[in-house]
Amino acid sequence: MINRVLLYNSGGGVGDALQILPLINVLKKEFNSANFYYLCAHENHFNSTLVDFNNKIETLNLGIKYFGFRWWHSLIIKNRIKKYDVKKFDLIIDLQSKIRNSLLLKMIPHEHFISSCLNFKFSNPKINVKKEKKINNKILKAINYVYQKEFKLVDFDLNKIDKKFFSESEKLLPRNNYVGFSITQGNVYRKKEWPLNKIIDTCNRIKEKNKIPVFLIEKKNVELKKKISNLLPEALFPEHETNIISPALVTCLGTRLEFAITIDNGVMHMLSLAKVPIISLFGPTDSDKFAPEYKNSVSLDSKKLYNTKDLSAITVEDVLTAAKQFVNF
């Protein structure tokens, strides 16, 4: 009987949280009597930024900021487990691969411990499954191995989003000939942005097919909006025309798009929840690991195409060729 489950995610971005929703969904479905807890090195986005997706998970509080990312955490973890009266978990799932973090996490009382770190070396019991790149597939295979099950990932149910977000997205984008663009990155440590001149060139090409470019950029990006508007007067910026600020609105706006072109960022994962036809551009990050995985998802990776991590190597023609499966260019 599984009564208590803990998930640990060291990623700090909204996208890091969104991409594991199919895994969380299957766990909640199959272990439906269990209480779920979330431990993260940063903020629990499910209970804050992503609250409108209605997928709250109780935060496990150990009073340790940036859990696992400081060497001295190993000196205080036992004391914190005792201080916060942390009860034994039936299952702990480690969603990252840093050795120190995994070893620290394993000190929390548990029955089963599943961690893909070093090909499941620290897991209990021992796990022997075929290697996978995508974290959801990797962890689910391990869970099925441990519990001798055949669980399958469960897609996010759009009906969990309040209808007001769908109504607002329809008001903002009432037509059916929109192409979305998400061009800003949240993580500043790796350059993941595609050059603006190539984005503008792409927009001009899709305009020839009577498509309207829609930019999904936050209100704080005022200068970028001005720059794009000067170059593309017909471009739309729906998030700048509403008082609603929520990732759930972005997902709903995605349902109004014919297709979208995006870099590897949080918006990519917001759109993928709605299975929006999508072209995702990758440079320094791993497309095999992070690209959305469904029928109308295409990823262009500069490492595979041009043997470079420089995203700017991807050409306008590369993108338009990929778009041909969505639009007749």
Image: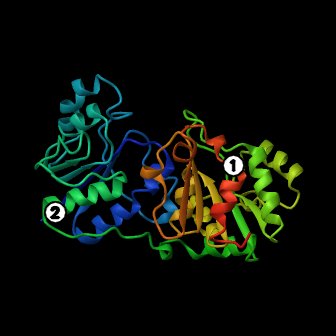
Residue 52 lies left or right of residue 184; in this view the side is left
Residue highlighted by disc 2: 2
Q: Residue at x 34, y 35 (%)?
A: 67
Could you classify mark 2 by the number of other residues whose Cα lies within 10 Å: few (under 14), some (14-19), or many (20 or more)?
Answer: some
Q: Residue at x 28, y 64 (%)?
A: 27
**Which circle marks residue 187 in the picture?**
none
Q: Quadrant of residue 293?
A: bottom left
Residue 260 lies left or right of residue 14; in this view the side is right
**Which circle marks residue 315 in the picture?**
1
The residue tagged with tag 1: helix, strand or loop? loop
Give how far across and how far down residue 19 sits, in percent.
44, 56
Q: Nearer the viewer, mark 2 or mark 1?
A: 1
Give how far across and how far down residue 224 sits, in percent.
77, 44
Q: Contact (CB < 8 A) between labels 2 and 1?
A: no
The residue lying toward the viewer, choosing from 51 and 312, is: 312
How many marks overall?
A: 2
Q: Residue at x 29, y 55 (%)?
A: 138
Give how far across and how far down residue 287 sits, in percent.
48, 50
The residue tagged with tag 2: helix, strand or loop? loop
The residue lying toward the viewer, choosing from 42 and 199, is: 199
Q: Amino acid at mark 1?
A: Thr
Give how far across and how far down residue 134 sits, in percent.
37, 54
Q: Quadrant of the N terminus?
A: bottom left
Q: Residue at x 30, y 23 (%)?
A: 71
